Amino acid sequence: MDNLKELLIKEYGELLTNEILNGYVGKYTTIRCNVDKNEVINILKDLNIEYEEVNNNPHALVLKNSNSKDIEELDLYKEGKIYLQSLSSQLPPLYMRINDKDQVLDMCAAPGSKTTEMSYLYPSCLITAIEKNKIRSERLAYNLKKQNVNNVTVMNTDASSLSEYMSFDSILLDAPCSGSGTIGAYKEFNMDGQIDNISHIQETLLKKAISLLKKDKYMIYSTCSILKEENEEVLKKVLSDDVEIIPINIDGVELLPSTLDGVLTIKPNKYYEGFFISLLHKKA
């Protein structure tokens, strides 16, 4: 059985691994605002919910004295004005280089956290959201409706089988992964023999994404894993003279060391989940 601690020690050493394991627990509840943040803040104040703003994300709030169950009971949540979403999960759409009227592809969209965020950030773009699992696809459609999203088309299909005649101005590939950045420190991490298979799926999806991306356009490749086999090693297989990494800079976030310059490997702590984010440019 693959043991998460052993895998992390192999990649990051014992001292840093212990810090990572401690970072899995005791997380704050975080939300994304789908309306003006001041409207949300005023309501939180009336409800005596303590909050903290986030310097690298103008749409996020950290809640200090409420859990997700508390938030789900609020009218704010039921009306789709806020969305429960980790700070790390909110980052990839912020780095998308999307212009007015762009055709955008979200390759692995369910349950729709980043899809709805992109819709809010870029309301004039046209988003195609892909999910191959029928039940998850239905959940995606439900979340889109709840948050009053009207610029997204859902396709219940395998993103790796999309037609070669399709093309997009911007692509988000938040790829399926082991979840090593988000698993609780005391939960069993049973990925025996599966990480090789997962990284192969990630490589297949990434190559498809690059083939569908228009020339001189940008895409995000991200995962909720902090294992290099699912992140840097997958990227190295697709980098070429025509595909390059565009460095991402971010303030206020603890990062883990990486074997590639310009990518973000976010270290788990009480604010952030472990996450990997990279911005790619297709030159030709």
Image (cartoon, helix red, strand yellow):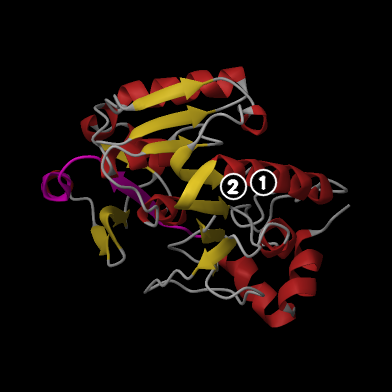
**Quarter of the picture holding the C terminus:** bottom right
Given residues 275 and 9, the one toward you in this image is 275
Q: Is residue 132 above or below residue 197?
A: above
Which residue lies under the disc numbered 1?
207
Q: How far apart are marks 1 and 2 (CA)?
A: 5 Å
Q: Position of residue 26 (x, y in %)?
A: 49, 60
Disc 2 crowd rating (10 Å Cα; few below 14, some 14-19, many 20+) is many
Q: Where is residue 14 in the image (x, y as percent from the top left)?
A: 74, 79
Q: Position of residue 91 (x, y in %)?
A: 41, 56
Q: Is residue 54 above or below residue 170?
A: below
Which residue lies under the disc numbered 2?
210
Query: Quarter of the image holding residue 125?
Result: top left
Q: From the viewer's perspective, is 152 left or right of 107?
A: left
Magenta residues (range):
25-42
Residue 83, visible in the rendered structure: yes
| Amino acid carrying mark 2 in the image | Ile
Query: Quarter of the image holding residue 142?
Result: top left
